[in-house]
Amino acid sequence: MVITSINRHDSKLIDAGYEAHRMNKNKTVLYSPLTMLILLAVAMQLSHQTWHTLVNNFTVSELGFSGREIGIVGSVREIPGFLAFGAILLVLFMREQYLAYVSLLMLAAGTAMTGLFPSEYGFYITTIIMSLGFHYFETMNQSLSLQWLPKDEAAYGLGKIVAAGSFASLAAYGLIYLTWSLLGLPYWQIYLIAGVLTAALLIFVMIKYPLFPQHVEQHKKLLMRQRYWLYYALTFMGGARRQIFIVFAGFMMVEKFGYSVGAITTLFLINHLFNMFFAPKIGKLIRHIGERSALTLEYIGLIVIFSTYAFVENATLAAVLYVADHAFFAMAIAIKTYFQKIADPKDIAPTAGVAFSINHIAAVSLPVMLGYVWLQNPSLVFLIGAGFAFISLILARLVPRHPEPGFEHIGLAPKAKAAE
């Protein structure tokens, strides 16, 4: 019998080796592309959620806006989204990661300046600056996410990014509560603080994180491929129905039910608590049941919610609908992962820009038109939203159970797969 003994010195060396391995693994996770994307999402939400949470109360109480001006703000805010395809021209001169940084800095600047120009046109100008940064950042963020995250983990990774953004939103609401409710600061100071915090976190990321490689060189030109038509259609309809929620659901809570800054912030708080805890689980669910089933579930729910919005007269029920509506937003991850599965890897960056522009065709035109509809019949605005959700449901049923290049939608699928 041979007995092998390990002395105390050898044991310490082994323990040190395990500890070094653990630290290296943790360091790899800490400085991974996913972690950087999470930090950038946090920085973005600090400014964007502060702007979004206060906008209805700020414009009504400080600027005296009605539904007409709110509709104009909605359209002005989405013009940069419609022009998101311009990001592809900019990546001719800079890396996508650099463009994401520049865009986030513009978002921070636009937010910081929002309250400094308390007039109708001053607000429109700062809104464009804020929105330009937000939409170009989101374009680059989507492109980099789909390039850097593996296909089998993309839904879960995107869910973690959504959850981190929701955590940042909670921080923004905490900021609003502290500065508005406790300290009584005016709007302009709250916007300024949010913009500075975003810029500070961005600087931290730029210092600590390297330039990550792009394993596939992206096309540096605008392109639209016929085989992506279902992705384009789902993206367009998503932009249309989302604008109704963003512009008019929140405005209804303030105008019709008299919700204060604190009440609106509480609703947003509930929304983002849900996303923080459940968005990664929704990502896992999408991976398990597939994009078609996830989108079907989302659109059926939205039909019910928008139809009920149209006739709600109870403030509590309206709040429940508002939270339920927002809860379905995380399901939109399925549209992104569907595209990732059918796309040529070289198409991801240019298609991200084109998709954002398509998403905002409706976003630019609808708020102004529906603003006038709102003045005549607010219920009709939400019934139109239910109609959009129904069209989206029809489109969702064309998504294959297992999408892939050459099998982008059921309509033109090979006979062997059409039964899916």
Image: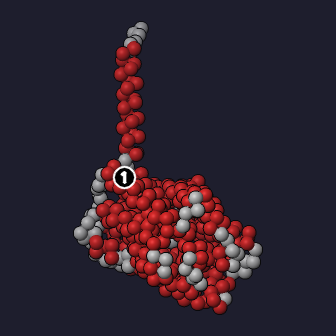
Q: Quadrant of the C terminus?
A: bottom right
Residue at 29% over, 67% down: 218
Task: Give the quarter of the image for residue 150.
Answer: bottom left
The answer to whether 159 is drawn above or below residue 221 in the figure is above
As helix, strand or loop, the secondary structure at mark 1 comes to helix
Query: For the point 51% across and 64% down, which residue is it?
Result: 190
User: At which x and y percent is residue 395?
Assistant: 54, 77
Examine the rendering and report whether any part of residue 20 can be seen.
Answer: yes
- Horizontal and vertical percent position of residue 244: 58, 78
Left or right of 71? Residue 252 is right
Residue at the location (55% across, 80% down)? 63
Relative to the observer, which residue lies in front, 199 or 369?
Answer: 199
**Direction from residue 42 to residue 17 in the image, left or right:** left
Identify the residue under disc 1.
Answer: 204
User: Which image quarter holds the N terminus?
Assistant: top left
**Picture quarter containing residue 341?**
bottom left
Place of residue 133 in the rendered image (x, y in percent of width and height, measured from the top left): 39, 70
**Which residue type carries mark 1?**
Phe
State the residue in front, 238 or 343.
238
Q: Nearer the viewer, residue 417 or 361?
A: 361
Q: Which residue is located at x 30 percent, y 62 percent? A: 98
Q: Is residue 275 visible?
A: no
Up-down relation of residue 136 to residue 272 (above or below): below
Residue 339 in the image: x percent, y percent? 43, 68
